[in-house]
Image (spheres, grey):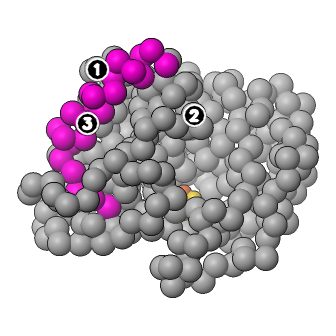
Amino acid sequence: MSDAPTVSLEGKSPFELRVHLGESVPEQSVREALATGDMGFLHSYTTGSAVDGPGIRVVAWTTGCMWRCQYCHNPDTWTLTNGLPVSVSNAVAELGKYRHGLKVMNGGFTVSGGEPLMQDRFAAKLLAGARQMDIHTAIETNGFYGERLSDAELDTIDLVMLGIKSWDPARHLALTGKEIEPTLAFARRLAARRRPMWIRFVLVPGLTDDFDDLARTAEFASGLGNVERVEVLPFHQLGRYKWERLGLKYALGDVAPATWEAAEQACDIFRKFGLKAV
Ligand code: SF4
C-alpha cells in the first residue's frame, strides 16, 4: 500500500477538519496495518506546538478513538479511516526533517490523537523511530489500552501525558462512554515503573469542576509519585464546528468556556496535594 498522494501530511492545526482520507484502503490492509504497525492513519503532523509536551514539538495526530467524550475537540479523529494512510517509514522520515530544530528548542515528538493506542503497533514503531533519532518522545493518551504497550515499549517513551476525565465512575461513563478503571490501572503501572507522567484534566463548567471530584483526582495523582505536572485545560468551543459539520449531536452548545479563574481554582486543588499544576 503506497501513501495517499494528494493530501499533505502536514496540517495547519488539529482543528482542521479532515475526513475520508483513508477510506479507499481495503479492509484487509487496514487489519494488517493494525496488526503490524507498518502503516498507520494520521489526521496530520503539526509543527511548532508549545502545548503538547516540553519545549517545541512535532505532533502526530492519529485517528481512531473508542471514547466519545462530550467535549471532544476533534471528533473527525474518531474514525480510523478518516486519517491519511502513511507508512511508518515515511512518517519517521518526515519527523527526521525536524530533528535538529527540535534539539535546539529542547522539544521533541508527541504522538496524540484521537487515541494513539487504537493504533498501538504504529504508535510504538513511530516512538521507537523517534527515539532512534535521539528525539524526546511523548504520548498523549486516555490510557484505556495502556496494556497494549509492553514494558520495553513504555521505556522508549520519555513522557506519558495521561488524560483523566473525571474521578467519579458514573460521571466518567456519562462523559466518555467508557469506564475509568483501565486508565487508573495504566497510571498505577506507569508509577510502578517510575515512568515520567503528566496528567491532563479538561475543566468543563458544570461537568468536571466538582470540588470533591477534583480533590480525589488530585489525591490519586499525588499518591502515584511519578506525576511531574498537572495541566488543567479550560474547556473551549473551538471544536464545535466539527460536530456540526459531521452531523453529530453536540451536547455542550450552551456551556460557556471555562474561565481563567476557575482553572486557577482547579490548579490550587492539585497544588494542595503537592502537585505542580498549571
Ligand atoms: S479520548 Fe480524546 S479523542 Fe477520544 S473522544 Fe475523548 S477527547 Fe476525543
Callout 3: SS:
helix
Q: CA distance from mark 2 to mark 3?
A: 19 Å
Mark 2 residue crowding within 10 angstroms, few (<14) / some (14–19) / many (20+) = few
- Contact check, label 3 and label 1, Cβ < 8 Å: no
Residue corresponding to mark 1: 133
Is 88 magenta? The answer is yes
Tell me how far mark 3 sits from mark 1, CA to CA. 12 Å
Give the left or right position of residue 223, taking residue 200 as reference.
right
Residue 22 picture quarter? bottom left
* SS for callout 1: loop
The amino acid pointed to by label 3 is: Glu
Is 265 one of the magenta-colored residues? no
> In the image, is residue 202 above or below residue 82?
above
Q: Relative to 63, is 248 above or below?
A: below
Chain-order first, disc 3 or disc 1:
3
Taking depth in this image into account, of 267 and 275 the one nearest to the observer is 267
2 or 1: mark nearer the eye: 2
What's the magenta bit mostly, secondary-structure-wise? helix
The answer to which of 64 and 185 lies nearer the viewer is 64
Q: Position of residue 205 (x, y in %)?
A: 83, 62
Residue 221 pos. (x, y %): 72, 35
Hey, what amino acid is under mark 2?
Ala
- The residue labelled by disc 3 is 94
Q: Which residue is mark 2?
A: 50
